[in-house]
Image: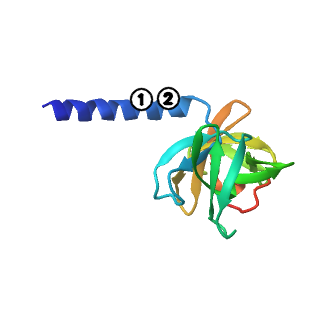
Amino acid sequence: MMFSSLLRLAALSAAFAASAALAAPVSSPANVRSGPSTKWPVVATIPAGADVTVLNCGGGWRRDWCKVAYGATKGYVAAGALAPSGNNVVVAPVVTTELANLYKGPGVRYPVIAAVPGGATVNQGGCVAGWQTRWCQVNYDGKVGYMMETLLQRQGALFPM
């Protein structure tokens, strides 16, 4: 009985969090993981533009991981989320690669709510699978919608994601 109550409470909490995530502005953080792959759990997030200390990186191939320190947090970040900035390394902001439509939902059948110019900085949230592409939740100029993942990149990142 208590287990089913806890399960219902967890489901309601997840539903509330999902609806709040759709209403609230999203951000472009980098996930910090306890190990060097997506199989390791996320232990923290670092906002775009934040300075990090790189402790060690892999061999430089795409999808490599770097061990970083950010304040008291230490963990692994995908190398493609990092960019040089002067003498520092930062979590690279997300920008559009070209003029891109921002759709009300994750697909071209939804209405276009904005046209986002190429090179514009956006706040990217989570991505979902769609027909032949992935769609990412994006906040641009106060409008929250969806954009094709292929039209987004981390600005200045040495390794594309």
Q: Which residue is mark 2?
A: 20
Q: Residues within 10 Å of mark 2 (few under 14, many from 20)?
A: few
C-alpha gap between disc 2 and disc 1: 6 Å
- Indicate the quadrant where residue 111 lies: top right
Amino acid, disc 1? Phe
Q: Quadrant of the C terminus?
A: bottom right
How is this picture coloured? rainbow
Q: Nearer the viewer, residue 54 or 152?
A: 54
- Give SS at disc 1: helix
Residue furthest to the right:
86
Residue located 74% across and 49% down the image: 100
Up the image or down, 107 lies above or below 13; here it is below
Whether residues under marks 2 and 1 lie with C-beta atoms below 8 angstroms apart, the answer is yes
Q: Position of residue 122 (x, y in %)?
A: 72, 41
Of the pair 9 and 106, the residue shown nearer to us: 9
Residue 16 - label: 1
Q: Quadrant of the N terminus?
A: top left
Q: Is 124 on the left-hand or right-hand side of 13?
A: right
Q: Position of residue 140 (x, y in %)?
A: 71, 37
Crowd tier of the residue under label 1, counting other residues whose Cα lies within 10 Å: few below 14, some 14–19, many 20 or above: few
Q: Which residue is most to the left? A: 1
Residue 6 located left or right of residue 112: left
Q: Looking at the image, which residue is at 74% across and 41% down?
A: 49
